Amino acid sequence: MKSLTEHLWFNTKNRIDFINITDKVQDLIKKSGVKEGIVLVNAMHITASVYINDAESGLINDYQKWLKELVPMDKNYEHNLTGEDNAYAHLMRTIMGREVVCAISNGKLDFGPWEQIYYAEFDGQRKKRVMVKIIGE
Ligand code: ZN
């Protein structure tokens, strides 16, 4: 069995940002030499998510509007009584998820026609990372 573990680092300009990381994950699959296997991609922070959906810019804006409606950034959250101001970011992360697991077939991400992997940052402007773990043969 082959395996590869690497981290992708981010430091977003905006506090909330969405980044398509599909090509970066595919590059790591190539580096791993795995032809048949599984890749796990997970945010290593509790205020960021990794999810799979369409790379359509209108949809990315829709996600941001929808999340801000569900989870207003400036509400009086109990978590913010600790001196933090990122309660909304923890809640958004829970909605959008922690990780994705994808099949690797013939050395490539085995995706449906519009599936893309996204890193969703909810409390950025600082260094944060995503782990990519690839296993297979
Ligand atoms: Zn916090």
Image: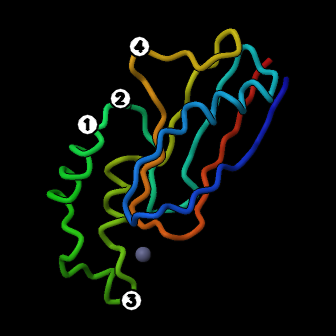
Residue position marked by numbered label 2 in the rendering: 54
Quadrant in the rendering for residue 105: top right
Q: Which residue is mark 3?
A: 82
| Rendered position, 77 above or below 7 | below
For ligand 1, tell me if the residue under mark 1 lies within 8 Å.
Answer: no
User: What is the C-alpha distance between the residues marked 3 and 1?
Assistant: 34 Å
Residue type pointed to by label 2: Asp
Q: Are marks 2 and 1 in contact (CB under 8 Å)?
A: yes
Identify the residue under disc 1.
59
Compute the Cα span from label 3 to label 4. 44 Å
Q: Position of residue 127 (x, y in %)?
A: 60, 66
The answer to whether mark 2 is within 8 Å of ligand 1 is no
**Label 2 vs label 4: CA separation?**
9 Å
Query: Please, what secondary structure does the residue beneath circle 2 have?
Result: loop
Secondary element under disc 4, as helix, strand or loop, is loop
Q: Earlier in the sequence, mark 3 or mark 2?
A: 2
Q: Kindly state the secondary structure of the residue where label 3 is placed.
A: helix
Mark 4 or mark 2, which is nearer the start of the sequence?
A: 2
Q: Quadrant of residue 52?
A: top left
Query: Please, which residue is most extreme toward the top here?
Result: 106
Q: Residue at x 43, y 57 (%)?
A: 121
Residue 63 left/right relative to 23: left
Q: Taking the image as four quarters, which one is ligand 1 found in?
A: bottom left
* Residue underneath mark 4: 113
